[in-house]
Structure formats: structure tokens, C-alpha cells
Image: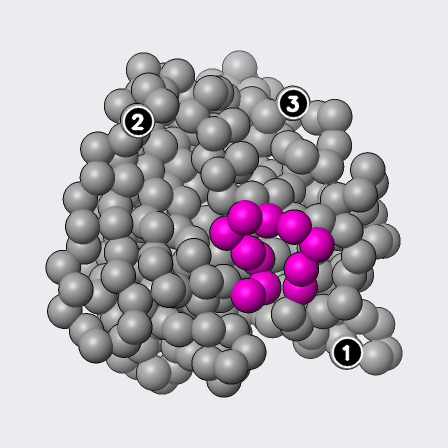
Amino acid sequence: MRAWCLVTFVFFGCSSAEATGGPDAGMLGAPGDTTRTLAGWPDRSYDLHVPPTYDGRTALPVVLAFHGGGGNRASQRKLSCPTGATTEPGCLDARADARGFIVVYPDGTGVPTLAPDTRTWNAGGGTGGWQCVSGYACNHAVDDVQYVRDLLTDLRTAVHVGKVFATGMSNGAALAHRLACELPGQLAGIAPVGGENQVQAATSTSCAGPVPVLDIHGTADPCWPWAGGAVSCLDGNPGAKVSVADSLAAWRARNGCDPIPSDTPVPDTANDGTTTVHHVWHCTGASVESFEVTGGGHTWPGGYGYFPVGTIGLTSRDFSANDAMLDFFAAHR
């Protein structure tokens, strides 16, 4: 690695083959599953899933998958599976294997002594009437942007890293939005599920752009309502959540998109009480797309229903969020 690239990597990250690894890079890492501790972040380990096609030399794209508020890295892995069994072929790990992606499952901050494995992210909020989504990490001003910086630095010592993408559920989805805003040049795209860009509404920090965005959200979400507002279903935090429309409109403005999308209905193959339309906007800067799940709840389409329907709403079985986001990421890798 040349000296200039080493300096760039230390402070900003480096996207060249010299920093991320390429066909001529030395052997680093191996396929399989490992758990890595992160220096400076006690009790904030992450799980690393490397596909069987990884050869130890070639950089592969990475998906950061952030759990929802009250979850943890294990629950996010389970959420992506149709019945919650992590050996299923429809899980994010298996679908990422088929496309040659590495998947990383990080841990948020637990509540010390009380609920250490009930974890949250600081995705923004807490001022000006905007909600501190999921509470603890936001209320305690945990620097999760720095946490992710440190994670990516550690990850690059474990495997050869190509482009980095992010997804997440709810509080984790909002963190993906925040990272796209505050880590310019680090993320090649995001695909949040059931959570919007709370940081753009709740702080004066301007979002970097353009960044490719695929937003997945249910119109009947009882926990992060489509229209936003002062509503929660799994916690009692005061303040409002930003709406889907406002979140997407801001990304379209940053990404230079036309206001009217082209719409494609997703085939309604499952009798699950939901239907879905795939919206694609024409953009000059970076892509903006969304899956509007009519009747869908606070759920991961094609994934595990982690709470009763009466609490979180319906899960679409007409499409897989895993496949939708991996297709989107593959188009930007």
C-alpha cells in the first residue's frame, strides 16, 4: 500500500484496490462465521458472515445489517429469515452468499445491568420535538457514527472489503439513514426497512449526498407510521418521527431526482393482506427507489414475524426484502 493511501485510509477510508484488497492482495480472512470484538467498545461485538466463494484475496462488497430498537445482532439475523430459522435458504446470509456479499451484524448499546442484550442505536432526534427513537443510545448521546467508523477499520483487518452498504430495521433503519448523511464516501448505498431519516429532521446537520437509497416501508406500520408523528408501539418515547414522504423527498432533492416515479406493482402472489408497488425515480445524482407495502406493518418483507400481528402488523410474503436490497446493492457495487 502506498503511503498516501495509508494516510487517506486512516482518516477517511480509501476505496482503491490498495486499501480494500484486490485480485493481487495477500491472503486475508476465510469463509464462514466469526464474532469479532471491537477495541474501545466493550460489549459491542459484531458477527461477520463471509460467503463460501471468498478466496482470501478478492475484495467483496459488504452489507451492514443493523438490528431494531430492543434487538441485538442475533435477532437481526433471525429477522431476515422466513420462519426465524437461520439455516433457511431465504435468510439474508444465504441470499448474500448467492451474490457474493459479506454480511456484518453489529450490536447497539445495551442498558447496563438492567437489559444488556436489549440494544438501541443513536439514530438522531431528541431535540425540537423530534423523537429519540428507541431511547437509550440517543438519550445518552452514544456516538454510533464513530462506532461504525471503528467497525469498518477493524473489518478491513479481517477481510478484503469492497464497497460498503447498509440496511437495518426500524431504529437500525434510521441509523442507516444517519450513516448515509454523516459518513460521506463510506457508504455506497442504503436500504432501510421500517425506519426513516430522523437525523435530517431532528438536527441542523446537513446530509451528504448523493447516496443511492432503497426505502422499504409499510403503509400500516403502527410503530413508525407512514405519515410520521408522535407514535410508538414498542416504547414510550416522546416526540415525533419523520414521515416516509418527507424522508424520501429529501433524498430525491439531494440525489437530483424527478418528482414523479415510474411504478411497478409487485405480483400479489401471497394471501397475506398486503400489496406492494415498487417506485423508481429518475435521478441525475444517485438512485432513489422504494417499496410501498400497502397494508404492511413494522415488519421485514419475507422475514420473521417477531411479535404478534396485533402489535407490529402484517408481513408481506409477496417479495423478499433480502432479495430486493441485494439486487439494489449489486447494481451499485
Q: Is residue 280 above or below residue 167?
A: above
* Image mark for residue 177: none
Identify the element where label 1 is drawn.
strand
CA distance separating discs 1 and 2: 45 Å
Q: Main secondary structure of the magenta part?
A: loop
Q: Where does residue 41 sit, x and y in percent of width and height?
A: 74, 56
The amino acid on which the numbered mark 3 sits, given as a three-letter code, is: Ser
Comparing 267 with 26, the one in front is: 267
The label number, if any, that marks residue 260 in the structure image: 2
Residue located beneath label 1 in the image: 115
Residue 200 belongs to the span the image colors magenta: no
**Is residue 221 shown left or right of residue 256?**
right
Give me the residue at 33% from left, 20% from top: 258
- Name the amino acid type tagged 2: Ile
Q: Nearer the viewer, mark 1 or mark 2?
A: 2
Q: Is residue 19 above or below residue 254?
A: below
Give the number of the mark in front: 1 or 3.
3
Name the colour scheme: one colour
Residue 152 visible in the displayed image: no
Q: Position of residue 294 (x, y in %)?
A: 34, 58
Q: Earlier in the sequence, mark 1 or mark 3?
A: 1
How far from the left and from the top, in percent, is residue 45?
62, 64
Residue 263 drawn above or below residue 182:
below
Q: Is residue 137 left or right of residue 257?
A: right
Q: Callout 1: few (<14), some (14-19), or many (20+) C-alpha neighbours within 10 Å?
A: few
The residue to which callout 3 is attached is 206
Where disc 3 sits, the SS reads loop
The magenta stretch is: 222-232
**Amino acid at circle 1:** Ala
